[in-house]
Image (tube, rainbow, N blue to C red):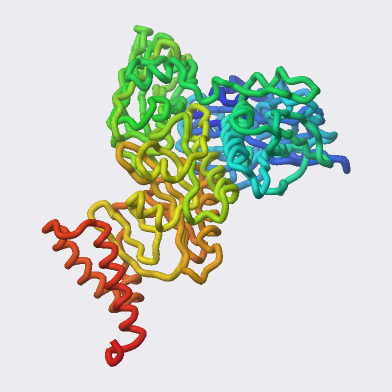
Amino acid sequence: MVTVTAGTSRGVRRRARVALAAAALACPLAVPVLLPAAASAETTPTSGSVTVEGEGGSSTSVPVPDGVRLRGLTATLSVAGTAPASVRLTVDGHQVARVRAKDGATVRLPASTSDIEDGYVTVGVIVGDDVCGDSDSEVSLSDFTLSYSGRPTVPRTVGDFFSDAVTDVQVVIPSDATDDVVEAGLAAVAAVADRYRGDTDVTMVLGGATKAGPLVRLVMLDSADSLSASVRTSGETPVLEIDGQDQDLADAAAALDSDGLALGGTGAVTALSDQASGATTASATAAADGEDVPLADLGIEDITLDGSGTASSYDVVRQDVFGGSVDGLDLHLTGVHTAVPSDVDARVDAYLNGHLVGSQALGEDTGLTLDLHADGDDLRGDNALELRLVSTCSASGLPIDVEISGSDSTVSATRGTGDLGALASWPQVAPGALAVAVGSAASSTPDAAVDAATLLVALQRASTDQIVPELVDASDLEDGSRSGLLVGAGEDDSDALDAGLSLSDLRVLDTGSGSFALASSSPFAALQSVRVGSHDVLVLGGWEPDNADGDDVALMHTVAAWVGRKGWSEVTGTYVVANDAGTVAQLAADTATPQEAVIDRTGSSVWWLVLGGAALALLLALGWVARRRQRVALARLVHAQQAYDATGPSQA
């Protein structure tokens, strides 16, 4: 069995533990039907998901708004592999239904306010009735929706403004915001995204909010001579207004992830900061220095496996905790297990990112030690550590218990460049403070900041610690003095950075083993990572012809929104590109080569490119021209051929 959970806030970040039902009362094989809700009943989507692999059970905590009367939940059932005939559903540890295991089915779970504990209702899935069952199925519950009556409690203070059941947070800045307000807006986005790690939607908007409701939160930032923060409502929507200037405003925004907000009373707050936000902890410093760090210091508590047959657990070790990219990872896992009799075969297997990296047989000696190593080519930004207990099963036998100590088990890393590819090397190449700059193609700094905020949310949710953004000039990134994020980049910026994909009508793309060139008058946008000296710059930019009006900016929004929807873990290519049709695709450097259909469409122009490229490659081999001159020469060849095609040989 495997427990996989996703939550929204710090309260549900704890690793959900596997919850096996020792016995459960049988109930009819049918989806339970909730009683008709009263006219005042409301529904709202909420966070949480739970997955069981094979036989067994697991649970997740689903947040419920304060002040409401819970009537029930619905969720989507997903089934893969060899599906069991049915699965059992639990609420607060009690079986409430047995439903057919149909992929994509909507299931209803009866629940009431008495099932809520500390603002959450626990929902579980149990697969299989046979203690010794063996199944390769994967059963999940996700897309939870709450049904309730009453109204959610309206927050009155800064301390209770961010409840766990919030579905949307919008950070609102003026459309003509000054740079210090823009920087504060980015800091607020990072802080809120760090607070809500799950399905809560966190965005930045200009001018005014685009969402409303009792489970929406608006954070409105603006300039003022002195700092103040206060809570009010706009209709049914709670609003947190923070006014100030310069570093005071940015510090207040960054503090929105702090537990210290609970100290705020009902009056206006006139000072707000959290100097620890984004600070490097002692454990992070030790990890960056290559020292052994307890797993507990990285948020991985004791790992427990129990049951008969197969039981599994999942945890994540992120690269950014080591202060940058790593070329190797070493884990020392130590723990205990119940004694295993000689007539039972049992072992613990360890997998990192799906690769078997260690195994130990279990016997009457109850000690357990696993020393694991993974090289850079097996690592990712988020490294999935799976421990799997595998044992022969006897219906009359006792289950096996294994416990790995989070405080006694350690992890260390060998720093290096890693082997992840350009975009996948983020956010670990620039942990903590992040410089943010606006390029030459941006329509305005606030508008470009919206894209920066979208990317920042994705990066924050892939980061161990809170990111603290700082607004800087583009030249600070282009001269290689620091790593950071450049949004609204144009052709001049890509030339200054010597970017792998040039932002111009002639798209010269570095494929790793060579280059590919294509001339086009269609606008496009791209996200790429550029190495400048010893630093890395994440670049979102675009290009449009002179007669266009903001097409490149719109396509930059498209790329950023795509990353925001997918999440940073899905950004695996070297480039993320959007064309003028709004289609977004990822390109890998080693596969970014022209396709036959492209060659057929471009006709003789490609032949000119091939000849020109071959000639220039020879000149480069002799050291006669530099890379920038290659681009210029290629552009001239392409433009000459385009003129030839337009006028014909008699006018050439």
Residue toward you, 405 or 551: 551
Say which residue appears at 56% left-offset and 21% top-offset.
275
Write down the quadrant of residue 475 in the picture. Answer: top left
Q: Quadrant of the C terminus?
A: bottom left
| Residue 541 in view (yes/no) | yes
Say which residue appears at 28% left-offset and 62% top-offset.
631
Write down the quadrant of residue 602 in the picture. Answer: bottom left
State whether residue 514 is above or below residue 339. Answer: below
Q: Position of residue 606 (x, y in %)?
A: 28, 73
Say which residue appears at 76% left-offset and 44% top-offset.
212
Q: Position of residue 232 (x, y in %)?
A: 80, 33
Q: Position of residue 549 (x, y in %)?
A: 55, 66
Say left or right for 59 vs 579: right
Say left or right for 508 vs 167: left
State whether residue 111 is above or below residue 618. Answer: above
Q: Residue at the bottom extreme? A: 650
Say which residue appears at 25% left-offset and 75% top-offset.
607
